[in-house]
Image: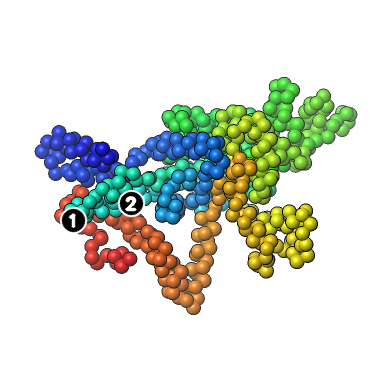
Amino acid sequence: MSNYRSELDNFANLINQQGASWSNLNPDYAARMKLQNQFKTGLDIAKYTADIMRKDMADYDADSAQYTQSLGCWHGFIGQQKMLAIKKHHGTTDKRYLYLSGWMVAALRSEFGPLPDQSMHEKTSVPALIEELYTFLRQADARELGHLFKELEQARNNNEDTAAIQDKIDNFETHIVPIVADIDAGFGNEEATYLLAKKMIEAGACCIQIENQVSDAKQCGHQDGKVTVPHEEFLAKIRAVRYAFLELGVDNGVIVARTDSLGAGLTQKIAVSQQPGDLADQYNAFIDGEEITNIADINNGDVLIKQNDQLLKPARLPNGLFKFKAGTGEDRVVLDCITSLQNGADLLWIETEKPHVGQIASMVNRIREVVPNAKLVYNNSPSFNWTLNFRQQVFDAWEQEGKDLSSYNRNELMNVEYDSTELAKAADEKIQSFQKDAAREAGIFHHLITLPTYHTAALSTDNLAKGYFGEEGMLAYVAGVQRQEIRQGLACVKHQDMAGSNIGDDHKEFFSGEQALKASGKDNTMNQF
């Protein structure tokens, strides 16, 4: 028996049991409304999507071609339109997620106005965006199912076969997908991290990404001045997130441990070591400094540590931060990742300075020597100049092969004059296959672009403004936007329907019957589309 038929029968029996006082209720309407709102709470969503991620992780372990993807979305509407597009063009949302970027929350969703990615925005804006995203995705479910119920009703009224429509309803694929949600460095100590993680999970997050920077000195992973914390401090926050998942009954919740050590040259603290070789001692071994052999070399206020039977004065900046030894970034990344996986993290995030499969693989292979199933979430960042990076990668590879490169200037490869060259085409092919190659060779389970919709919003607005306020006038909108929406089949061209007008009309009819004042009559201009 179908879900729809089952719900219809259940409500019919319930209404009948209540007697005359419920006799004016329609079990069909109740069944529709229930099916159009499959997820009643954020915790329902978190449990459902956590199971999806766990299945996808197992699929990837069996076959690296089964990697997953997401785009960062800064508003519920953007996330909704993304999932509608995925279903329209690809037929399924399988292996497609949403990403919630702390960068975009700071830049676009803070009450302070645009902020840099330095954890200065309100922490409550993060769970608020998660809730907003899922509100819009649930509305997408309601809208699409509402149209199917209308088709079913019309087919019944016309005595037509309803089997195909019934099948679409019974096998409807929800727009609800996992969100990888950025908690930055936890917005405070481990208790603050736990409290915020709970709010995020209650809003629907099944996957929380946390980084090993100092929370009150956090920097965007693509900026300078990053400061990491000792392992034990980071592991305490990982445990805090896990306890939040367990408390709320999301036992399959996923934790992504992000390390910024590759680009972080500073630490705020000297770790407290209990015995030689422990995690703290390993962390401190990366700190730069000078050996002290004479007490006269110690100045007032200097800090000293014992390291490998030597007395070391760590290199300390005027702001009190300590420097790591040059060239230790990759070793610190590997230790960060192994330690995180051994202490409750499920996935890794290595923030790199360029998109290079070989560089990522060199670190992942070392990690997998200790944790064989280690896998990554990777930031296909807009902070990279993808065109220049890959053209230079091809240039360097060809140079090693001895090819004639006299017609190319390596430092000028971004120039449009190279766009039609053999080198540019080879670079674009490498960009196109980057995710597939990195999933296969570098252990990347999930590929995301952190802030693509920030850039697409800016680009599309710039193009419209250029024409609309210029000689094109209204044609800029008609030709560049509306005509394209119509011809490409964007549901959003009927913006009233997208905003919920038809859903509201259905409800008015449910509640008021023939007295309902509906908006979708013959004079609704939306009927032009």
| Picture layout, residue 357 above or below residue 515 | above
Q: For the residue labelled by badge 1, is the local secondary structure a helix, a strand or a loop?
A: loop
The amino acid marked with disc number 1 is Asn
x and y percentages locating residue 290 in the rendered image: 83, 34
Frontmost residue, 134 versus 367? 367
Q: Which residue is mark 1?
A: 158
Residue 178's mark?
Answer: none
State which quarter of the image contains the C terminus: bottom left
Instruction: Indicate left or right for 272 with 188 as reference.
Output: right
Disc 2 or disc 1, which is closer to the eye? 1
* Residue 420, horizontal then vertical, whole percent: 65, 67
Distance from label 2 to label 1 (Cα)? 21 Å
Above or below: residue 504 compared with residue 419? above
Quadrant of the image for the N terminus?
top left
Which numbered disc covers residue 144? 2
The structure residue drawn at horizontal position 72% and vertical position 63%, both measured from the top left corner, is 412
Classify residue 390 by image quadrant: bottom right
Residue type at mark 2?
Glu
Residue ID at (20%, 38%): 9
